[in-house]
Image (tube, rainbow, N blue to C red):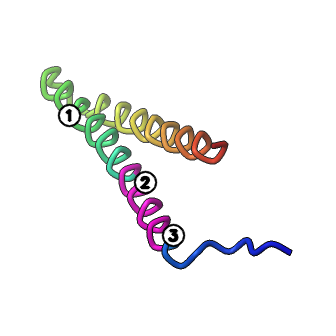
Amino acid sequence: MPDTKKPRQEQPINQMKTYARYSAMAFQMLFIILAGVAGGWWIDSKTGWNFPIFTVLLSMLSVGLAIYYATKDLLSKKKK
C-alpha cells in the first residue's frame, strides 16, 4: 500500500500557500465592499438627499459581488 502522506517539508509550504490565498481573497472582498460604500457615499453627497439610498444600495450590491467573486475563486481552485 503506497504512502499517501506528504513529506514533512511540503506541509508548511502548502499551509503558507493556503494562508496567502485566503488572505488575498479577504483583502479583495474588503476592497470591493469599501469601494461600493465609498461610491455610494460619494453619490449621496452629490445628490443631497436626506436618506442615503445610494450608500445602502451600493453597499448591498458590493457585498453580493464580493461573495460572488470569492465563491467563483474557491470553486475554480478546487477543480484544479
Q: In the image, what residue type sits under mark 2? A: Arg
Q: In the image, what residue type sits under mark 3? A: Glu
The alpha-carbon separation of the residues under discs 1 and 2 comes to: 30 Å
Residue at 45 percent across and 34 percent down: it is: 65
What SS does tag 2 mark?
helix
In the rendered structure, the answer to whether residue 49 lies left or right of residue 64 reads left
Q: Is residue 80 above or below residue 44?
A: below
Which residue is outermost to the right? Answer: 1
In the rendered structure, the answer to whether residue 19 lies left or right of residue 54 reads right
**Spot occupied by residue 72 in the image (x, y as percentages of width and height):** 56, 38
Residue at 73 percent across and 71 percent down: it is: 4
> Which residue in the structure is indicated by mark 1?
41
Give 23 or 12, whichever is nearer the viewer.
12
The alpha-carbon separation of the residues under discs 3 and 1 comes to: 47 Å
What SS does tag 1 mark?
helix
Q: Can you tell which of label 3 and label 2 is closer to the viewer?
A: 3
> Which residue in the structure is indicated by mark 3?
10
Residue at 56 percent across and 46 percent down: it is: 74
Number of dots carrying numbers: 3
- Crowd tier of the residue under label 2, counting other residues whose Cα lies within 10 Å: few below 14, some 14–19, many 20 or above: few
Which callout, 3 or 1, points at the residue further toward the start of the chain?
3
**Spot occupied by residue 32 in the image (x, y as percentages of width and height):** 33, 38
Quadrant location of residue 20?
bottom left
Q: Which residues are magenta?
A: 12-25
Q: In the image, what residue type sits under mark 1? A: Trp
The alpha-carbon separation of the residues under discs 3 and 2 comes to: 17 Å
- The dominant secondary structure in magenta is helix
What SS does tag 3 mark?
helix
Which mark, by number, is residue 21?
Answer: 2
Does the CB distance between marks 1 and 2 fall below 8 Å? no
Q: Is residue 13 above or below residue 37?
A: below
Which callout, 3 or 2, points at the residue further toward the start of the chain?
3
